[in-house]
Image (spheres, helix red, strand yellow):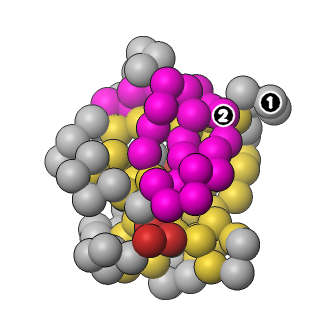
Amino acid sequence: MSALYIITSQSNGLVLDIADGKRSPPGSPVYTNADKNFLSQKWAIDTDAGTINTYLTGNFCMDIEDDQLVINPFQSGKHSQQCERKGLTIFNRNNNYGSSSYWKRGGSKGDRGSTKC
């Protein structure tokens, strides 16, 4: 697995987290939460596929459904799952909608790290 990251909002310091943690079925919402070093707050970037993958659920990645950020199984070429990082901002590859965030390396299970990327 590639490096793990904690994605933190520049505006309020909250981090991206998955509702219900390990029990998250497809379509589970991604929301902001205080940084508690939960595994559900760790993300891996697949630059080839253009996805941000959750550490918890294997092949699940961030997706946009009905204007809500959720996790779903990876589907090759699905535009709503494709994003990229430009500096400290995450953009959807297809519509250039972006959100500013900090990227902290989260290391491995239990290793929080603090490197900004």
- Tag of residue 100: 2
Would you place residue 82 above or below residue 66 in this image? Answer: above
Coordinates of residue 41 in the picture (x, y in percent): 52, 48
Q: Residue at x 33, y 55 (%)?
A: 50
Q: For the magenta stretch, what is the residue range?
A: 84-107
89 relative position to 73: left or right? right
Gap between marks 1 and 2 measured at Cα: 8 Å
Coordinates of residue 67 in the picture (x, y in percent): 72, 72
Q: Residue furthest right?
A: 12
Q: Residue at x 72, y 27 (%)?
A: 10
Coordinates of residue 57 in the picture (x, y in percent): 35, 69
Q: Say if residue 84 shows up in the picture.
A: yes
Q: Residue at x 72, y 47 (%)?
A: 33
| Picture quadrant where residue 29 is located | bottom right
Question: The residue under label 2 is which amino acid type?
Answer: Ser
Query: Is disc 2 placed on a helix, strand or loop?
Result: strand
Q: Nearer the viewer, residue 85 or 8?
A: 85
Q: Nearer the viewer, residue 26 or 99?
A: 99
Q: Nearer the viewer, residue 116 or 64?
A: 64
Task: Tell me, yes or no, whether the two marked residues, 1 and 2, touch with CB atoms within 8 Å.
Answer: yes
Question: The residue under label 1 is which amino acid type?
Answer: Ser
66 relative position to 43: left or right? right
Residue, disc 1: 11
